[in-house]
Amino acid sequence: MKLRNPYIIFAILIVFCLNAVNAVNRPTYESPYFNTDTLKINKLSELQDRIKLTHKSRENQIRIETDFPASDALIGEIINMIGVSCQKTNFRANTTIDYNLKPGIYFVVIYFNKTRVFSSKILVSQ
């Protein structure tokens, strides 16, 4: 079998190797209390600065801290990579969301008055 373009196979092999190296090379320091698996935070609105997300992967928890008044209705949602909502929680102030998810990458989205104001990716590795 003769390959028409061996560079395509070579490029695929390089991408595969880079992904394998990234999967194996985890940070060597892990806090006993928090394992920061948050990958990226997208700037959606000015309200985003009023929300802090902490992912506690060892405890299967996401802690959401806000400086919104306790009367403001907020919604926290965990969405998988194909866009399916895995969990949705209504809350009014700081909250902790317990989850039971399969390993993978998920998005945590916070809604304020039915408008998305915060989005973050998390890695579930257990």
Image (cartoon, rainbow, N blue to C red):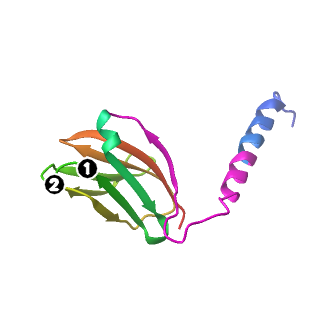
Q: Amino acid at mark 1?
A: Asp
Q: What amino acid is labelled 2 in the image?
A: Ala
Q: Secondary structure at mark 2?
A: loop
Judge from the rendering whether residue 44 lies leftward or rightward of residue 111; answer left or right: right
Name the quadrant containing residue 116. Answer: top left
Task: From the top left corner, tell me how far across and down residue 123 is, in percent.
Answer: 51, 56
Residue 11: say if magenta. Answer: no
Q: Nearer the viewer, residue 122 or 47?
A: 47
Quarter of the image that includes the N terminus: top right
| Whether residue 68 is situated above or below residue 97 in the rendered picture | above
CA distance for labels 1 and 2: 9 Å
Q: Residues within 10 Å of mark 1 (few under 14, many from 20)?
A: few
Residue holding disc 2: 70
Residue in the image at 82% along x and 27% along y: 4
Residue 3 image point, x, y percent: 84, 32
- The residue that appears at 33% across and 47% down in the rendered structure is 51
Q: Give percent across and percent down for residue 18.
A: 72, 46
**Side of 105 where 68 appears, left or right:** left
Magenta range: 17-45
Q: How dense is the environment of label 2, judged by Cα within 10 Å: few (below 14), some, or many (20 and up)? A: few
On whether residue 26 falls in the magenta region, the answer is yes
Instruction: Give the residue at mark 1.
Output: 67
* Farthest top residue in view: 4
| Residue beneath the point at 37% across and 65% down | 99
The residue lying toward the viewer, choosing from 126 and 57, is 57
Q: Is residue 5 above or below residue 14?
A: above
Q: Nearer the viewer, residue 9 or 69?
A: 69
